[in-house]
Image: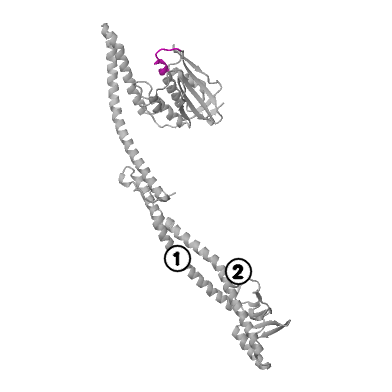
């Protein structure tokens, strides 16, 4: 596996592969063109020999009927044609014109030029090119100037094979030159159009990966309208987002470190003030007795806020460790921690069946339920005139693809501002002085399990649905 900062070997570079592919494709096309042209060259060569044979027959017809003269003329004509014998038919009779100095072959290879389908011509050309050389050809054909009478020409195959070899060599060199010129031209075009932009993108990605905090390494956007232009613009936008995000996170990390230090000292100071307020509350002064509870309550809220900020800063991205958990028992435990067990004003209805078990991280899921139940309890406790009995209900349902745990109450519901900033730390609280960390933490832990936490809008009260994949549920 090539590491991101490792240079690509020259033999494996995109430009090398591209030019090799172009040459290979062009040579393949040339081979496909070469086979028919080879067959055509062989057919033309054989046709020429048939024409020469036809001319020899006509010349022989014009020679006076002198046996010695006819024999000498026939030998000279056959020697000129490069043939050892010519057979021609006339008026239904076959006549043989042979060279007396050349012995007749015992076996011959037939080339019937009356069959001119592509398959026959191509296979004949390959046969001559590969296996020819020492054989004797028997060329059969009907030249136009001989009517329908066929002519047979017997001659060595070596000259034909030599001609085809020269032709093949010339075609090969020409094809190679054409392939290199074409490949070079296409490569120069594609190198400017594709290779160089891709290399620019690749080099930029390698450099930006090493130093994403360096804004000068962000690639400049391209004005091209094609896919590469879109890729460069999207890469520039992504690198800008990463640069901004890293700087924001670094800024937040520095700010968080400073806030943690200040918050730690502030919490210690508030704890000392709380101890003093407890001592002041023991005084008999009526005015002190009237103001002390409010002071103690204010200090408790301030300490709680400071502690919540510290707890949120300590949150880690630990992966859940799923275990088989009794859901009803888990809810009852979370309800106890949320202060709902034995609450004098709030009724808790746990409608989850006893036999339901789920495969989750018990500690993380308990925190999710605790935050939801605690928010519901605080919402009900903060109500003014209560016309109905305060109630918190927990229901369970299975839709086939997921199971849902619903936590609902009949309280005042969430105000619009809280609904707009749900699950956002320090913004999504429904009560004054709240941090909104409970829902933010609950959603993060739920999503770590592959589920979702949703607020369900309804006319009155508040409802949250904890949705988990069915695969997490075991009965």
Q: Which mark is residue 122?
A: 2
Looking at the image, which residue is at 50% across and 20% down? 394
Spot occupied by residue 124 in the image (x, y as percentages of width and height): 62, 71
Q: Local crowd at mark 1 within 10 Å, few (<14), some, or many (≥20)?
A: some
Spot occupied by residue 284 in the image (x, y as percentages of width and height): 27, 5
Quadrant the C terminus occupies = top right
State the residue position of label 1.
Answer: 180
Give whichever of 473, 167 is nearer the camera.
Answer: 167
Looking at the image, which residue is at 43% across and 50% down? 227
230 relative position to 295: left or right: right
Element carrying mark 1: helix
Can residue 101 be seen here? no
Give whichever of 131, 49 is nearer the camera.
Answer: 49
Displayed quadrant of residue 42: bottom right
Measured along the vertical axis of the image, is residue 198 above or below residue 155? above
Which residue range is magenta in the image? Answer: 377-387
Mark 1–mark 2 distance (CA, rounded to whole Å): 27 Å
Measured along the vertical axis of the image, is residue 169 above or below residue 204? below
Give whichever of 47, 154 is nearer the camera.
Answer: 47
Can residue 385 be seen here? yes
Q: Is residue 82 magenta?
A: no
Spot occupied by residue 244 in the image (x, y as percentages of width and height): 33, 39
Measured along the vertical axis of the image, is residue 285 above or below residue 104? above
Q: Local crowd at mark 2 within 10 Å, few (<14), some, or many (≥20)?
A: many
Of the image marks 1 and 2, the number of the one nearer the N terminus? 2
Displayed quadrant of residue 209: top left
Q: Is residue 384 magenta?
A: yes
């Amino acid at each position: 596996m090539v590491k991101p900062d490792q240079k690509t070997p020259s033999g494996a570079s995109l430009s090398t592969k591209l030019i090799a592919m172009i040459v290979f494709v062009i040579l393949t096309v040339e081979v496909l063109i070469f086979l028919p042209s080879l067959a055509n060259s062989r057919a033309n060569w054989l046709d020429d020999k048939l024409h020469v044979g036809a001319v020899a027959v006509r010349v022989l017809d014009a020679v006076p009927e002198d046996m010695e003269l006819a024999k000498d003329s026939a030998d000279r004509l056959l020697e000129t044609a490069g043939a050892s014998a010519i057979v021609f038919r006339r008026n239904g009779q076959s006549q043989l014109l042979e060279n007396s100095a050349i012995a007749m072959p015992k076996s011959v290879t037939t080339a019937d030029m009356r069959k001119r389908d592509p398959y026959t011509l191509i296979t004949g050309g390959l046969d001559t090119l590969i296996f020819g050389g020492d054989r004797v050809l028997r060329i059969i054909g009907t030249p136009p100037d001989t009517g329908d009478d066929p002519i047979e020409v017997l001659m060595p195959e070596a000259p034909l094979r030599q001609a085809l070899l020269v032709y093949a060599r010339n075609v090969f060199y020409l094809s190679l030159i054409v392939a290199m010129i074409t490949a070079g031209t296409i490569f120069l075009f594609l190198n400017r159009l594709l290779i160089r932009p891709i290399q620019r993108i690749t080099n930029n990605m390698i450099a930006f990966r090493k130093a994403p905090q360096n804004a000068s390494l962000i690639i400049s956007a391209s004005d091209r309208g094609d896919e590469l232009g879109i890729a460069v613009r999207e890469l520039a936008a992504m690198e800008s987002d990463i640069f901004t995000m890293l700087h924001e996170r670094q800024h937040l990390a520095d700010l968080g470190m400073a806030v943690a230090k200040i918050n730690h000292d502030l919490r210690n100071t508030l704890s000392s003030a709380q101890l003093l307020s407890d001592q002041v509350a023991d005084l008999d002064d009526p005015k002190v007795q009237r103001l002390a509870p409010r002071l103690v309550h204010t200090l408790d809220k301030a300490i709680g806020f400071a502690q919540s900020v510290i707890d949120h800063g300590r949150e880690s991205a630990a992966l859940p460790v799923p275990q088989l958990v009794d859901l009803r028992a888990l809810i009852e435990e979370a309800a106890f921690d949320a202060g709902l067990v034995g609450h004098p004003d709030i009724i808790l209805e746990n409608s989850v069946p006893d036999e339901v078990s789920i495969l989750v991280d018990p500690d993380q899921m308990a925190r999710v339920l605790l935050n939801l139940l605690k928010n519901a309890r605080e919402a009900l406790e903060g109500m003014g005139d209560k016309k109905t009995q305060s109630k918190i209900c927990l229901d369970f349902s299975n839709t086939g693809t997921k199971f849902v745990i619903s936590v609902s109450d009949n309280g005042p519901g969430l105000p619009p501002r809280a609904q707009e900033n749900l699950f956002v730390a320090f913004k999504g609280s429904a009560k004054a002085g709240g941090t909104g960390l409970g829902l933010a933490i609950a959603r993060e832990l739920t999503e770590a399990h592959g589920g979702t936490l949703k607020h369900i809008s309804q006319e009155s009260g508040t409802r949250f649905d904890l949705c988990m994949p069915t695969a997490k549920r075991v009965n």
